Image (tube, coloured by chain):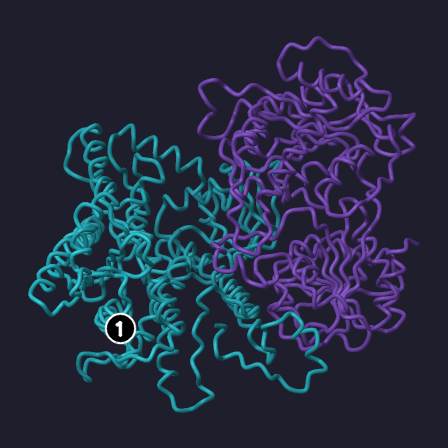
Chain colours: A purple, B cyan
Amino acid sequence: MSSVVKALRTFVAGSGAIAVVKAPPGSGKTFTLVESLEAGMKSHRRIVIAAQTNNQVDEICQRIADRYPERSVVRFSGSGYQRPADIDERVVFIDKKNAIPDGPVVMVATVAKLALSKFDGDFDILFVDEAWQMAWADFLPVRHVADRYVFIGDPGQIPPTVAIDVDRWESSEHPPHQATPTLILENPSLVGLRTELQLPTCRRLPYDSVRLVNGFYDFEFDSDAKPGERFVRPTKKATAETPAAEGVDRALAAMWSTSRPTTTSIIQMPTPTGGLPVGTDIELARFTAAVVARLLERRCEVSTKVDEKNAPRPLRPVDIGVVSTHNLMNTAIQNELRALSPKFASIRVTTPERWQGLEKPVMVAVHPLSGVMSPSAFDLETGRLCVMASRHQSACFFVTRDHVSATLDDHLPLADQALGCHDAVGKGHALHRAFLEYHRERNLIV
Amino acid sequence: MTNEIRTTRRLRAWHEGRPLPRGEKVNVHVGDDDEVLCLSFVRMGGESLPWGVAVGHPHQEPRIFTVPDPRDRDMVADMMVEVGKVLLEHFGHPSFASDEDEAMTMYEFRQIWVPGVSHLELLHSIAFAYARTAWERPEVEVLRALGNLANCLFVEAQRPGQQTVVVAPHALTTAFDFPSSPVRQAHLGHLLAWMGREKSRESRLRAATEAENLSVATTLDPEFERTRLESLVERWNAPPRDQRTAKGKRVARDIDNVVAEQLRHRHALVVRTIDVLRRDTRGANPGLAELVRIGTTKFARLWWDQVVRERSANPDERPYWPGLRGDNNARQAAFAYQQRVASSRQALHSLVHGDRTLQEEELQRGHGVRAKVVAVEAGGARWTLVYDFPSLPDIKVGGSMAIAGAPKMQVRVMAVSNSDRTIVVAPNWSAPKNSSGPLAKRAGDPTWRGRQLILIEDFPVHFTESSSYRILDKTESGFDILDHFRHSIATEIVEPIDGGDE
């Protein structure tokens, strides 16, 4: 049992007010949450777990049912919500507050569902999964569900979605649009009230990718994988007849140019002299699809864990994921993939928001600044880049137009944030630069 | 609207050489003349309060207020007392009706139009100067009331979908796509020149460029201010500095003439904007009526109710005026944030069903599907649809969607398959919804099969509204994050919340 699980169990069984658990990608957030419930169950607590989406809630229910086969789990859902066919029968679905059992219980619900029901300390502890996606304004309506809280999530990833102008609250002491754990951790008055924990090890990513992704975080974490343990390797030679094929070949060669393979690279295509297209960059979408096709054409094999290091398995279309920040770009990539082969229909192509919590052996990512000639604060926010760079188990190939480095050089942020606020845009700019520099230093930009 | 759509439309407008209508309908509410007050400011460079103000209903001679030197805060305050009386009467402040019979007994819809964003920002400066002033001077209560009104108008202007404060260039760019860069589209004169009678793109562009030479912001063109006003102001300030002398009056009149001319120019542009939108043959989006109704209630809650409470002798009914620097009260900030999220969703919900262009924009964003009903379960409990656009809709299982044009006909998404482009939905009605026109059929009606529909994502606005009120329903002060964590041991809340956060 990890020291974090132990510490969290002690917290759950005790009387502390707030615990915040920082978890890097693929470090076992849900595992830690589920394991720590044991202390609550033993001490007969009433426990409620809040997650952001129905899918996350169902997954947590299933994980609890698997881990504690002797217990039932209450799933508090909307009235029209349909029970998933494959969920364990010990998960009891209820949609009315008065159906919540008395006494010790473990209940799971979405944040939205809890916010719509009136609670007043009905539970002992509220766990919030993916807590960095929960804005302060979303926490306040559920704060009366319990008196004690455990926030667990990934601080490096995409911040809560903000669809409105938030200038009015930029310099507030408690900006309602900011992530709840961020506000709690920044509040000096809470030092004595909070327990701060960090999950120490990323299990998903290859060794060198952990070093790269760690740059997005303000705390250190380790890699479960050893150097050279995870990789993608071509087994077939084939003449490169397109720029994309040539790019993939050069990227693979660069990744295998050292004694231990590296697992990320950036494949560039030229920025047209007449400027980029106004709409979706169809040429880049075609290029991205061709990168996927080339990886399969070279009959790559992958190692995703220690057992596979000496017996890598063949890469299949379903082992590949594609991510880009825009839906229109994703649509274009999906169309191009389908045009190349019907077998590519199984390749998941979607936005970083929808990739959160998921993983694939190999990821192909469209760099979020590709085609962005004047990066805005939104563009320079690094949560999306961090998600894109942390979904793979074996390798990640970024594709981009070749202007990104020059664009970052030309657009230094103004640091025009409100007085007293962090220069988040400047930090984003620096992290984007560091991301490129990491690859440049290792000759991984081709 | 995404940047791509915006850029494409701008290029199309450039190709056509004229502004092109944006949307199937006009999505800005233009009130009747008696509901609308046009408000324009001019200020001296470097000053934060007005040099002059033009205020008046459209198609009536505006009332012009000016001072000889806007650096004299007494004179400016005297002027703003008079401006305040006009504005407060327009918005129905119970203390400022021209006669008692005309005083509003409940808040009614009122609108102000300003020529640009800088005029809106000046409302914020007025609020800063007067809302909390402790100045002991005659009619200071008018200044305070004006400050509070200005602050509430400034706050309301940021609420998505509101129709109370209209920034004229925003109204025009909501209704038309202009063939010029976004920065230039902030200039009202530039926009109206593009809409002029010139025939060719070149002549329109020339007119628009020429119009830009005349400032419509709150500040004057610096060269103009230097050459036309600087020496006059110096003369006015030269000893003996007395407006009562014939010389002083003459100089004050000269200054007034110059500033008034600038104010009239701004006022006229706003009135022209109103006329352009009223004459538009597309007509107003029917959903605007709902936004006006909601906006009236929201502004009443924000401003009118507080005014009424201010007059109450009961100390428990003290008004809650919004903070001038933002909401420092954590609960108030979170409440206001959730309210704005709800307003944003409400604005889309109200307008999208009345405008097919907005529906197309939603589809392009992935917030809906164009689909054909391929199966209707007996009783209409489930429909299966196959969509052909967009290829990757961003819709969620468990989410709610509405049939475009029939907002009350909603379905819940039960399953989505991007690989075979099918979605399964559960209609939320069984009997025909009579308000839905030709679509008024029961969910189980077999004629739905084969029908092409547009389904638009429909966020449950009332859920967000309800959860926002959940933020307010406790006795913590909300000033400090600790308030909640120690509330279980607190015996008494010492910090009152109803005094605002200033």
Give x and y (percent) for residue B192.
Answer: 21, 43
Nearest the camera: A53 or B277?
A: B277
Tell me: residue A374, above or below residue B244: above
- Residue occupying image coordinates x 72% and y 67%: A190
- Residue occupying image coordinates x 31% and y 39%: B184
Query: Is B132 on the left or on the right of A263, as rendered?
Result: left
Query: Is A236 on the left or on the right of B465, as rendered?
Result: right
Quadrant of residue B407 within the rendered picture: bottom left
How many discs mark residues in the rendered view? 1
Q: Is residue B371 among what the camera can see?
A: no
Quadrant of residue A193 within the rendered picture: bottom right
Q: Is residue B319 among what the camera can see?
A: yes
**Callout 1: few (<14), some (14-19), or many (20+) C-alpha neighbours within 10 Å?**
some
**Residue furthest toward the front?**
B239
**Split into 4 quadrants, where in the image is the N terminus of chain B?**
top left
Q: Report the chain holding disc 1.
A: B
Query: Is A303 on the left or on the right of B457, as rendered?
Result: right
Give x and y (percent) for residue B77.
Answer: 27, 70
Quadrant of residue B251 within the rendered picture: bottom left
Question: Circle 1 — which element?
Answer: helix
Tell me: residue A249, above or below residue B372: above
The residue type indicated by label 1 comes to Leu
Query: Is B354 on the left or on the right of A163, as rendered?
Result: left
Give x and y (percent) for residue B2.
Answer: 45, 40
**Residue furthest toward the left?**
B246
- Residue occupying image coordinates x 44% and y 61%: B343
Nearest the camera: A219 or A127?
A: A219
Tell me: residue B481, above or below residue A22: below
Give x and y (percent) for residue A38.
Answer: 88, 64
Residue matched to label 1: B88
